[in-house]
Each structure stands twice: as structure tokens, then as C-alpha cells.
Image (cartoon, rainbow, N blue to C red):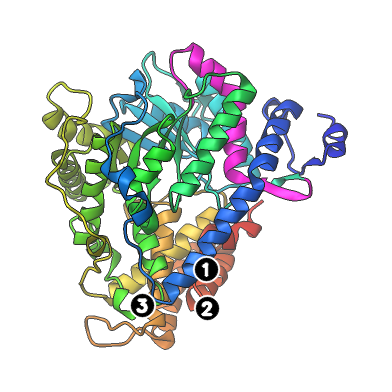
């Protein structure tokens, strides 16, 4: 590709491209991304500035409530536009990065929906991002295939596949490999723009459409910005308004207070809301970081049965169903344990109980991270759906949630084992992420950026507020350093010095310790560590 013409237009592409990747990063596609970035850059920056202002308010003791200025909207009757046929049944959704083999296996998994993820389960190396777009183009065209270079095993799509949904990166992230007017473009607009440019018309011709998951929104004004992007993009590409459909992840504490408002802003393009439970716990810690009374117990003691999480999930169901939108449950992080049948059975039982609760509460579907969990999850939803495609008829008018319910801090122990787990999982995940892998099985759980965020913010919170362990010891720097050093000395011995270095552990340890031990809490691990990715 001749980049000189683009450079003359103040569009600068820095990443290397293979011949097939050049078919994605075409001048026309990059101009489309540039158009969106230029048009919405100022508003995006304004909204990110508003986040920083509100963070200062939180730190000063302010706490949110449901918006008084939108009370009439919440109390009035309205519904979103009709949801397309291929998004009516979402009982099981499988998620994962846009890796070629992963895409094929996920689309063939028996799940109703596959969410191809450019965000928390994808380490955003240039190759991962741009090759992911190649893979999705081939998946939409139905031509995607993969041959394992070691075994020779071939992978191709089945005749029937899951509905494809794509999650672009959040508003807070930039794509450093593309600059427009001297500034890195919005990573979310880069992911969205390339996917829409190459696939929207093909999807419509196939009777589907460009369906999205929107991450990390903190309020309805951020949803309004996405809606404006959708309108502009559809007009530019000549596809009907409302063709794009988006499900919003309610995975920040502020967004939980604006579910109605978010759906209303996106009502022409909305498909539903999702309980992004892991990021939600992370946000619960981050937003209330300055408050000693908001210290959470061990991650393993913060399940969906806790009051603040149960309130949020049930409010989501009631809100969605009142508006004709799907209410999606959260992720099951467990994965099958092939080498231990007893442990695998116990893990599946946890998944089964979690999905049974979601189904019986009225959710329309749920998330899993592994094909081996699809049947377990589907069985629980089949039992309550009884032939229906969803539970939009389950109104949950019994649910009443106040601000104090969403802000209720769960009690529970903080243990040495919890400190060790957070240190171990956080560093092991970050090391894998630095190597280009954003979706990592650790101790029989599928960890991604959201669960790593819980690990590092919990450690930061416990250290900042001098949390007390169950045995009476205080979590201070000396205790943390002993535990931290022990954990990674054993990993170094297990791997050997050369492999320890190759797997990026020294840099991961350095970055993770800086995140945990500094006075201020860094907003996002991925922003902090991003400069170290290729």
C-alpha cells in the first residue's frame, strides 16, 4: 500500500502489514476511521475529562444516586426498537479473542452467540488487532479456515453457526499504530470502523447485521456518543439507520445508576444490557478507593449472591424487560479440568448453580469462556425457557433497588491465601498479556484483563487502608513483599531463568509492583502497560 497519499491527508499508519492485512487497512477503510475519529474526537475527550472530574468527586466522599433530571424518562413507558431475529435467542453466548482457531471453534460451539472480543480478552498487539479484523472478515464471508501447523488438523465452519457479535475497545483506549492529525485514534472507533466498513453490507445481505457489545461505559452521555457514531457511520456507508445493534455491558458502578437512560439513548440501536460482573467488581473498588469502609474481602468471597451484585443483576433484568431489551447474565470463568475428573465435576457444578440462578431470576442468556461449558449453561436455560426464545415476558416488577443497595459493601475475610492468589494471578496474567495473550487459563479459571484488574486493585486497596487478615496480621508493605517474593521465586525455579525471562516475568513483576505499591490508583492496567506491547 502506498502510504504517501494518506500521509498527505494527515493519516499516518505505523504498523507493518502482511498482504492479507493490507486488504483490511486499505486507504478507503482508514479514511473512514479517520472521518469518525475527527468528527467525534472532541466529544470523546470531553467525556473522558468528565470521568476524571467525577473521580475527584468520589475521592472527596460524593456518592451517586439515580438521576433526578431523568426521573420522568425512567417512569414513562417506552421501548427500544425491535431486536433482529438472529438475536432473539441468546441463551448461551461464548466469548474470546478474534484468534482464527478460536473464532471457528466458538462459532461451531453450539452457543447461540459468539462475541469476538478486541477488549479484555485480547492483548492489543498490532498483529492481534489487525489480524483479528482479517479473521472476522473471513468469518462473515463464510470462508474462514485454519490448519494447525503442528498437527495438521483442519478447522472449518459448520453449516449452522452462532450469531457473531463484536466487542470493540473502550472509549479510554487509543490505537497507537494509526494517527490522524498527529493524534492516535480512538481504539474503539478503529475496531468498530474497520469491522463495519468491511462487513456491514455482507452481514445485511446474509439476513443478519453488524452487532456489537459496548464496554466500560460510565453513563448515558457515553452511550449517546456511540449512538451518534452509529448514525454517522450508517449514513456514510449507505446502510439503513438502525442496522447496527448494540448490547451495553453494565460493568461500571456509575452505569448501574443509568440503565434506563443508556437504553433510551441507544433505543434505535439497542439490543440489551449485560452484567459484566468482573469489571463491575473492579469498578466498585476503583470508584470507592478512598473510603476505608469500602474494602472488599477475598475475590472468592465476592460472588453474585452478595447483596450489591444481586441488586445490580436483578435491576438490570427489570429495566431491560420493561424496555423490550435482553438482560444478559455474566461470565462463568471456570474451565473443564481434563486431568482431574473430580475437580472438573466440582467446577461444572459451580457453573450449573450460577446459571440456574441467572435463568430463574429472569435473565435471557449468559456468558461462558469455554466450549466445554456451553451444554451445562444451555441446560439450565432450557429448563426455564420451555420452548421460548427468551424471558422478555418476565417483568420482575417485584424488584425494588435503591442507591444504598448498589453501594452496599459485602463483609468477609481477607486471607493470606487471598493475597497470594491476587499477586500470583495478577503477575502471571500480565506476563502472558505482555507476550500477546489476553485470555489465560490460570488455576483452572479463565482470566482476562477484568479479573487481573480485581487482583491488582484489591492488593492496592488492602495496602492503602491497612486491611487486617483473618489471622490478625495487617496487610502492609513488609508482609506483601515477603508473600510476593515467595510466589515468584517458586515460579522462577519451576521455569528456570531463561524461560522466566522469555515469558516476560521480570517486566510483569516490575509493572505489577508499581501498580500495587504506588500511592494513587491507576485507572486501567491496560493503559499503564500498553506502551510495552508491540
Which mark is drawn over residue 291? 3
Q: Residues within 10 Å of mark 3 (few under 14, many from 20)?
A: some
Numbered range of the magenta stretch: 181-210
Q: In the image, which is nearer the foreground, mark 3 or mark 2? A: 3
**Quarter-wise, where is residue 23 in the image?**
top right
Q: Residue at x 44, y 53 (%)?
A: 218
Q: Can residue 65 be seen?
A: yes
Dot 1: element:
loop
Examine the structure image and report whether residue 192 is included in the region drawn in magenta.
Answer: yes
Q: Position of residue 102 (x, y in %)?
A: 45, 33
Q: Which residue is mark 1?
A: 522
Residue 127 sits above or below residue 205 on the image: below
Sequence-wise, the earlier of marks 3 and 2 is 3
Q: Nearer the viewer, mark 1 or mark 3?
A: 3
Q: Nearer the viewer, residue 471 or 162?
A: 162
Residue pointed to by mark 2: 518
Measure the C-alpha gap from mark 1 to mark 3: 16 Å
Amino acid at each position: 500500500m502506498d502510504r504517501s497519499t494518506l500521509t498527505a491527508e494527515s493519516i499516518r499508519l505505523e504498523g507493518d502489514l502482511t498482504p492479507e492485512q493490507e486488504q483490511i487497512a486499505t486507504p478507503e477503510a482508514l479514511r473512514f476511521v479517520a472521518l469518525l475519529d475527527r468528527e467525534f474526537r472532541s466529544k470523546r475527550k470531553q467525556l473522558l475529562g468528565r470521568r476524571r472530574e467525577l473521580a475527584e468527586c468520589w475521592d472527596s466522599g460524593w456518592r451517586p444516586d439515580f438521576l433526578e433530571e431523568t426521573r420522568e424518562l425512567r417512569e414513562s413507558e417506552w421501548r427500544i426498537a425491535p431486536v433482529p431475529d438472529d438475536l432473539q435467542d441468546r441463551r448461551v453466548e461464548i466469548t474470546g479473542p478474534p484468534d482464527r482457531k478460536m473464532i471457528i471453534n466458538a462459532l461451531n460451539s453450539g452457543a447461540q452467540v459468539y462475541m469476538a472480543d478486541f477488549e479484555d480478552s485480547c492483548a492489543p498487539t498490532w498483529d492481534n488487532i489487525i489480524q483479528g479484523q482479517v479473521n472476522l472478515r473471513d468469518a462473515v464471508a463464510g470462508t474462514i479456515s485454519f490448519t494447525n501447523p503442528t498437527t495438521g488438523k483442519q478447522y472449518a465452519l459448520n453449516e449452522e453457526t452462532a450469531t457473531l457479535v463484536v466487542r470493540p475497545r473502550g472509549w479510554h483506549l487509543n490505537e497507537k499504530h494509526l494517527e490522524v492529525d498527529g493524534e492516535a485514534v480512538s481504539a474503539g472507533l478503529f475496531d468498530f470502523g474497520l469491522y463495519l466498513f468491511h462487513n456491514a453490507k455482507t452481514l445485511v445481505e446474509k439476513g443478519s447485521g453488524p452487532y456489537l457489545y459496548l464496554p466500560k461505559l460510565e453513563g448515558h452521555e457515553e452511550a449517546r456518543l456511540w449512538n451518534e457514531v452509529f448514525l454517522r457511520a450508517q449514513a456514510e456507508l449507505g446502510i439503513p439507520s438502525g442496522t447496527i445493534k448494540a448490547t451495553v455491558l453494565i460493568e461500571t458502578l456509575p452505569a448501574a445508576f443509568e440503565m434506563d437512560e443508556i437504553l433510551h439513548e441507544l433505543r434505535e440501536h439497542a439490543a440489551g444490557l449485560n452484567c459484566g460482573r468482573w469489571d463491575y467488581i473492579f469498578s466498585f473498588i476503583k470508584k470507592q478507593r478512598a473510603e476505608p469502609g469500602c474494602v472488599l474481602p477475598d475475590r472468592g468471597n465476592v460472588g453474585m449472591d452478595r447483596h450489591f451484585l444481586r441488586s445490580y443483576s436483578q435491576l438490570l433484568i427489570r429495566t431491560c424487560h420493561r424496555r423490550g431489551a435482553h438482560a444478559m447474565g455474566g461470565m462463568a470463568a471456570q474451565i473443564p479440568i481434563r486431568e482431574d475428573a473430580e475437580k472438573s465435576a466440582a467446577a461444572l457444578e459451580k457453573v450449573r448453580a450460577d446459571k440456574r440462578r441467572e435463568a430463574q431470576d429472569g435473565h435471557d442468556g449468559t456468558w461462558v469462556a469455554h466450549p466445554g461449558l456451553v451444554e451445562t449453561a444451555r441446560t439450565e436455560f432450557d429448563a426455564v425457557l420451555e420452548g421460548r426464545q427468551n424471558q422478555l415476558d418476565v417483568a420482575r416488577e417485584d424488584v425494588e433497588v435503591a442507591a444504598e443497595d448498589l453501594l452496599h459493601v459485602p463483609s468477609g475475610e481477607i486471607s493470606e491465601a487471598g493475597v497470594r492468589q491476587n499477586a500470583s494471578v495478577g503477575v502471571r496474567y500480565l506476563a502472558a498479556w505482555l507476550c500477546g495473550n489476553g485470555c489465560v487459563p490460570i488455576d483452572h479459571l479463565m482470566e482476562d484483563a477484568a479479573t487481573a484488574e480485581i487482583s491488582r486493585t484489591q492488593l492496592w486497596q488492602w495496602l492503602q487502608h491497612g486491611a487486617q487478615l483473618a489471622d490478625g496480621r495487617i496487610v502492609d508493605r513488609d508482609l506483601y513483599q515477603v508473600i510476593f517474593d515467595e510466589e515468584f521465586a517458586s515460579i522462577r525455579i519451576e521455569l528456570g531463568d531463561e524461560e522466566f525471562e522469555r515469558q516476560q516475568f521480570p517486566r510483569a513483576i516490575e509493572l505489577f509492583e508499581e501498580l500495587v505499591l504506588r500511592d494513587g490508583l491507576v485507572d486501567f492496567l491496560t493503559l499503564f502497560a500498553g506502551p510495552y506491547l508491540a
